[in-house]
Image (spheres, rainbow, N blue to C red):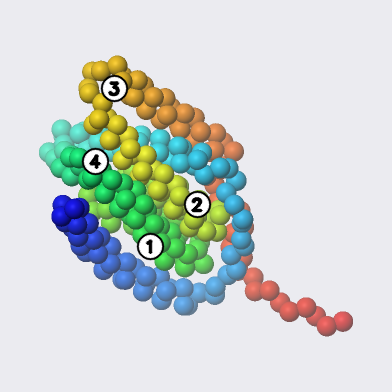
Amino acid sequence: MELNIRYFVMWLINAIISYLPPLIVFTLIAFLIIKFIKKGNVTETATLPVPIFLYFIAMYSLITVANIINHWGANVLDHFFGTGELRDIFGAVMPENLNQWLTLLLFAGIVAPIAEELIYRHILLKPLRCLNDRWAVIITALLFGALHGNRTQFLYAVVGGIILGIAAVRANSIKPAIIIHMLNNSFDIGKSFMFELIEEDSFGHIVLMNSYVLLIFAGLVTAAILMAKRGFSLPPKLLSSETPQPPTPS
C-alpha cells in the first residue's frame, strides 16, 4: 500500500509540473485571441459515424506504427549525427507485482485519460474550434505530444491526439475521446501484463504475439477503410460564422 501511495504522489507531482504551467499560459492566449474574433455557432453532431471500438483499434494500430517509425528515425539520426537513442521510459517503471499492475491500470488506464481529455479536448480544443476545427485538432495534438516531455512518446502521442480530437469534434463531446483513450491505455497495460506473465519462447507467448500482430493488422485495415470512407475527416460545416437573425415580422 505504501508503494502505491508513493507511485501516486510521484505521478501527481509530475502531472502538475508538466501540464499546469503551459496549460495556464496556452489557455490565456487562446481566450485572448478568441476575444477579438466573432464567435461562430458550432453545429452539433449527435454521435460518431462508426462504433467507438473501430476508432480504438484503428488508433491503436496507427500509434503502434508511429512508434516503430519514431524509433527507426531516431536510430537513423543517431547513426549519422550521434543524437542518441530513444530512452526506454517504460522499462524502468514496469510494475513488479499484481498490486502495482492494478495501481497502474487505475491511474494510467482510467484517471489519466479522463484528466488528459478534459485538458486537451475540452479546455483547449473547445475554444479553439471557434477559429478552425482542423487547426484546433492539430494544435492540441501537437501540444499533447510535446507535453509528454520526451522524444519516445512524441510521435505516437501526436497521432493519437489527432484521432482523439477528430472523435471529440465529430461527436461534439469529449465522451468518445475519453472512452477511446481509456480503451487504448488499458489495453496496452493488459497486453504488457500478459507478456510479462507468460514465459518467453513458450507456446502461449507465441499465440499471444501472433494475436497481437493480427490485431495490429486488423486495426490498420480498419484505419484504411475509415480513411477511404472519410471516417477520419471533419464534417464540412461544423463552424458557422453567421449569426442567426431574428425573423422579420410579417
Amino acid type shown at disc 2: Pro
**Mark nearer the N terminus (4 vs 3):** 4
Residue on which the image places disc 1? 119
Mark 2: secondary structure: helix
Q: CA distance from mark 3 to mark 1?
A: 38 Å
Indicate left or right for 122 with 200 as reference. Answer: right
Q: Which residue is labeled 4 in the image? A: 98
Residue on which disc 3 sits: 205
Residue visible at 52% across and 56% down?
Answer: 169
Mark 4 vs mark 3: give the one in front.
4
Image coords of residue 11 (percent x, y) = 22, 56
* Nearer to us in this view, 36 or 127: 127
In 3D space, how far apart are the residues under numbered discs 2 and 4 (Cα atoms)?
29 Å
Q: Which residue is mark 2?
A: 176
Q: Is residue 30 above or below residue 164?
A: below
Nearer the camera: disc 3 or disc 1: 3
Question: Separation of disc 4 and disc 3 at Cα?
Answer: 19 Å
